[in-house]
Amino acid sequence: MRFGTEKSDYTECTCIIVVDLKGQEADILIGVVVDSVSGILNIKADDIEDTPTFGTKLDTAYILGMAKVEGGVKILLDIDRVPSSRGVAALESAA
């Protein structure tokens, strides 16, 4: 829903991913509900390329970069930019 998609029902594929957000005061562990997970990859920092320009119609603020892995290209999400700064501040004060 954070990316403007419609709410979907939970299924047997729905997962919670635990992420470590970098807050101003301290790091915060939260769980993010996702529709599904298709795999887990280990990507070296050297394999991450800068985010290309997709034009003005696509907001790339959430994209950390792109990596070429296993014969394909993966778009990497910058999880620290997904929640709003107000949302992170609320999480920090609740922790």
Image (cartoon, rainbow, N blue to C red):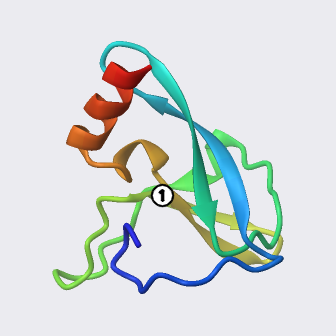
- Single out the residue that lies furthest toward the left: 56
Point out residue 3 in the picture as x, y percentages from the top left corner: 37, 73
Point out residue 56 in the picture as x, y percentages from the top left corner: 16, 80
Q: Check the image and report above or below for 77 versus 12.
A: above
In what element is the residue under mark 1?
Answer: strand
Q: Check the image and report above or below for 6 versus 69.
A: below
State the quadrant of the N terminus.
Answer: bottom left
State the quadrant of the C terminus.
Answer: top left
Residue drawn at the location 50% of the way across and 58% of the way down: 77
Point out residue 17 in the picture as x, y percentages from the top left corner: 68, 51
Label 1 neighbour load within 10 Å: few <14, some 14-19, many 20+: some
Specify the quadrant of the image occupied by residue 34: bottom right
Residue drawn at the location 73% of the way across and 49% of the way down: 43
**On the image, numbered disc 1 is attached to which residue?**
65
Residue drawn at the location 31% of the way across and 80% of the way down: 54
Using residue 66 as the reference point, say whether residue 39 is left or right of it. right
